[in-house]
Image (cartoon, rainbow, N blue to C red):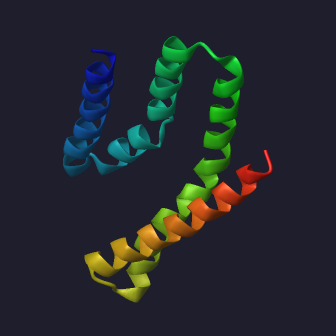
């Protein structure tokens, strides 16, 4: 039941932002940029496990990952000048995100 509730909340949030992006892209971008998914996830995690040590580690991981994950948007910004098609832009963005993941992973191997 809890898992289903998590799915419904996350899907409503993503669906709403996706719908809103066609009408008010700036507002939709702001909503997605809010740490709503982190907030919801941290609340669910606390009530499911009640382990503050793990929750602290989880929050630290999020804090480090957020700036790293912003590289995803670089190809979309550069696309204004490079004029890449959507597929190449998305593949480049995901590739940069993979590099960011490996950096994040290596930072937390020592923790």
- Asked which quadrant contains residue 32, the reply is top left
Residue 14 rendering spot, x and y as whole percentages: 29, 39
Which residue is rendered at x = 50% and y = 18% of the image? 43
Q: Is residue 109 above or below residue 9?
A: below
Which residue is rendered at x = 24% and y = 36% of the image? 16
Q: Is residue 77 visible?
A: no
Q: Is residue 96 above or below residue 27?
A: below
Query: Of 49 and 61, which appears nearest the observer?
Result: 49
Which residue is rendered at x = 28% and y = 29% of the image? 7
Residue sticking out furthest to the right: 110
- Asked which quadrant contains residue 111, the reply is top right
Query: Which quadrant of the rendered structure holds the N terminus?
Result: top left
Q: Is residue 56 above or below residue 103?
A: above
Residue 110 rendering spot, x and y as whole percentages: 80, 51
Drawn side of residue 100 relative to residue 109, left or right? left
Which residue is rendered at x = 53% and y = 24% of the image? 42
Q: Is residue 74 above or below residue 70?
A: below
């Amino acid at each position: 039941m809890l898992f289903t509730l998590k799915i419904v909340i996350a899907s409503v949030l993503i669906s709403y932002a996706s719908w809103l992006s066609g009408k008010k892209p700036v507002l939709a971008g702001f909503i997605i940029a809010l740490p709503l998914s982190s907030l919801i996830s941290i609340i669910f995690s606390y009530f499911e496990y009640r382990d503050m040590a793990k929750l602290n580690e989880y929050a630290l991981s999020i804090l480090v990952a957020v700036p790293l994950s912003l590289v995803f948007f670089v190809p979309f910004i550069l696309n204004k000048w490079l004029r890449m098609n959507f597929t190449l832009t998305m593949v480049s963005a995901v590739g940069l995100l993979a590099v960011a993941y490996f950096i994040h992973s290596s930072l937390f191997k020592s923790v």
